[in-house]
Image (cartoon, grey):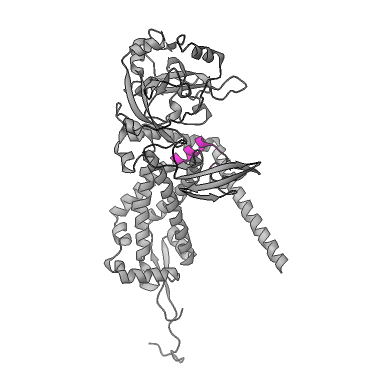
Amino acid sequence: MSTSSIPNTMPPAARQRFIRRHSPTVRATHWLNVLCLSFLLLSGLQIFNAHPRLYWGQYGADPDAAFLSIGTRQTGSASQGFLQVGPLHIETTGFLGVSDEGGSATARAFPAWLTIPSYHDLGAGRRWHFFFAWLLVLNGLLYLAHGFWRGHFRRDLVPSSGQLAPRHLRHEVLDHARLRFARGEEARRYNALQKLSYLVVVFGLLPLMVLTGLTMSPGLDAAFHFLPDLFGGRASARTIHFVTAFLLVSFVVVHVVMVIASGLWNNLRSMLTGQYAITDEGTRP
Amino acid sequence: MTTRQSSRRNFLARLAAGAGALALTGCDRLVQDDNVDAVLRQTEKLTLAGQRALLSRHALAREYTEADLSPVFRANGTQMPDSNEYARLLEGSFMDWRLKVDGLVERPQSLSLAELKRFPSRTQITRHDCVEGWSAIGKWHGVPLAHVLDAAGLKPGARYVVLHCADDLEKALDGSGRYYESIDLIDAYHPQTILAYGMNGRDLPVRHGAPLRLRVERQLGYKQAKYLMRIEVVDGFSTLFGGKGGFWEDRGYEWYAGI
């Protein structure tokens, strides 16, 4: 428009603008969740260490067959740690079964740096676990109430029909694998893979975690007889609790990698202040 | 160049190890902080209040069938009390054993095994859940605690039932280590709360608490006191042993073990 003496041969530069991405409730519950899940994982491994064997069915104790166990075997003067999953036997000395505690090799399922407290104290582990379990549930209920009430789930997490088209999904998977992320208008919304994984965590894994946890309580089983049946028994519920924890850890690993790869500061800022920078499609990178 | 690289790598490794150790000791320091612990212990009240609100006073623990029984029921804790008195009682097939019932009761009792077996009995196949995470299903046969308490008659002010055992699970130098447990009257009068003298169709084996053990089915294993010698009805347990109401409670477990 303006009469510039320089001919406009340069393509327009990419332009940055800010949008409001996360509501205050989502930001607050997200970080509280980070705190809860961290403490729940580490205190949970302390509790697991008290009996590092997993079973399927209504009951399960040492005389019964375990489908997963972490143990220690004494061979001469050396002790060896192992992980046994069905017929699979893996030597894990130094990490699982036997690891360093206070400078000496100690028989313990998960190592000191993965448990709260670092030394064996089931009572303390349980106190930390239940405190953060209550907090997680209250935080989760707040998040769910907000999500339904303010339309967060409907607006931001339910994939559009276009996003679910097989062609589009295939395209997204390839983009993800090449760590190519959306820009411009497309970056305003979550992509389908994001939406689906958040939905699986929010409505699948976390409720499953809470329900299998509650099923391990003899008090709650007396109040709700269907609880153990839901999971094939109390021993099975404990197993599912452990496997689901592993799936949640896997989600967090991928989540954090994606956060870093798609712009650490922008993502962190949006989860702290709500402001997310969008780079409009310029032809110049 | 390689030395500089390896020394940098060394430095980074030491830095990472140091950061890990710092986080570790930081967490342990939090765990050992009395104020933090006091906050965490409030959770038990929340859990108790929550479960009591959900559980009706008489809601029964699930009962299983013979087909569900654990092939081998793991014995835990003391498996043979280490005292001359117990050895003598065992040798006499518990003919000389008596269960004392005293404390805040109108008519203190001293009951033989034969007398206990004359009360109406109850049989239940239930799941035993250990605090450690394992469970086992067993069949228990015994007298509902309510009958024994009714025979003794509670005095006004009675709030808890303390179960004194014959075994020292952990003999400390000061002589403490005697196993004991306590439950409130809601659990004491629950229909499935029984003093069991039979297990899986036989007399209660020594490793499972002969001649008499408690079954309080809506709580964890450490509440199921074995080798019972005396039942004391009290208005509080702060002056007993460690003051927390049980052997494991004195060593850090929750008094309410419904979770």
Q: Start and end of the magenta stretch? A: A116-130
In percent of the image, x 61 and y 52: which residue is there?
B19
Residue B230 can be seen in this image: yes
Farthest left residue? Answer: A161
Identify which residue, A285 or B199, lies in the foreground. B199
Residue A190 pos. (x, y %): 36, 64
Comparing A216 with A41, the one in front is A216
In the image, A69 versus A162, the foreground residue is A69
In the picture, measured across the screen, residue A196 lies left or right of residue A38, that is left
Where, by quadrant of the figure, is residue B185 drawn?
top left
Give residue B230's position: percent from left, percent from top: 45, 14
Residue A2 x %, y %: 40, 88
Q: Is residue B190 visible?
A: no
The image position of residue A144, as x and y in percent, is 33, 50
Does residue A48 lie above or below A92 as drawn? Answer: above
* A165 to B21, vertically: above or below: below
Verify whether residue A120 appears in magenta.
Answer: yes
Farthest residue, direction top: B107
Predominant SS along the magenta part: helix
* Quadrant for the C terminus of chain B in the image: top left
Write down the quadrant of residue B71 in the picture. Answer: top left
Residue A80 in which image quadrant: top right
| Relative horizontal placement of residue A82, taking residue B221 as reference (left or right) | right
| Residue A282 covered by magenta stretch | no
Q: How many marks?
A: 0
On the rendered image, what quadrant is the N terminus of chain B found in?
A: bottom right
The residue lying toward the viewer, choosing from A175 and A154, is A175
